[in-house]
Amino acid sequence: MDKSRIKTANNNLLKRAEERAKMCNTDVSKWIKGDKLYEEQFGQPNQQPENKPKPPNMLRSKKGQFYIFAAIVLITFAFMIAKPAPKLQEKPDAFKELYQNFITESSIVVNTALYDNANVSDRYRSFADSYSQYATTKSPKFRFAYILKDDNTLVIGNRLGEELNVTLSNTSQTLGDKKELTTSPQKATLYIEGTKYEFTMGQETYQAKTLFRQKTDTETRIYVVK
């Protein structure tokens, strides 16, 4: 195809464009090929919005609500497991506390009497009376009997609230409540409601043996220090 034919074809295209532009009332001088000027002149073609999937609303979705609820339950359960359970406090055992305190404090009484060069038997007797009165305020059924070796003397004291049968090497006798029996150091046997409790003194100068009892309508508890 020669140049004259190409020019003629272009002119024909231009005339058609001018006619179309006149119909649209458009300045042809500004019309050229190209999308940019066409878009500036006639505007962008209507574009359909892309149908992009919207993210699911977890709060509105039933499945999302279920997952959130399950997560809360699991977190709460984990917190309850991690939290240490409170320890149950044991009910105080008045009988045990009373005899343990007597053992501890009676040793202090003997050592204090020796330090003060006082009469050990008298100090111990006074302590036993005071402790017997105190113990009944904590446990009304708490009772005890004691055997004290004070050098060359043996003292048996009864704070059982009833008579006590005492057997020594060569004699047996009944010791009333809140009474003492004084003799020489030797083996002593105490009988309480038909049960025998034997006490043998060692070579130490000062020794203390004790029998504790707590008798109620349902049980009898006894603790012996030999």
Image (cartoon, rainbow, N blue to C red):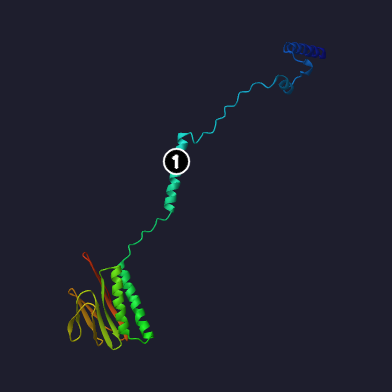
| Image location of residue 119, percent across then percent down | 32, 86
Q: In this view, does 192 lie to the left or right of 33?
A: left
Determine crowd level at label 1: few under 14, some 14-19, many 20+ residues with C-alpha closer than 10 A. Answer: few
| Image location of residue 118, percent across then percent down | 35, 86
| Image location of residue 87, percent across then percent down | 38, 59
Q: Check the image and report above or below for 143 versus 14.
A: below
* Quarter holding residue 190: bottom left
Q: Check the image and report above or below for 41 versus 177.
A: above
* Quarter holding residue 83: bottom left
Front one among 217 and 60: 217
Q: Check the image and report above or below for 199 versus 73.
A: below
Q: Check the image and report above or below for 188 versus 25.
A: below
| Residue in the image at 31% along x and 78% along y | 127
| Residue in the image at 45% along x and 47% along y | 75
* Quarter holding residue 25: top right
Q: Is residue 171 left or right of residue 25?
A: left
| Residue in the image at 76% along x and 12% along y | 18
Q: Which secondary structure lies at badge 1?
A: helix
Q: What residue type is labelled 1?
A: Phe
The answer to whether residue 110 is visible is yes
Q: In this view, does 162 lie to the left or right of 64?
A: left
- Residue furthest to the right: 4
What residue would you read off at disc 1?
69
Question: Where does the C terminus fall, quadrant-wise?
Answer: bottom left
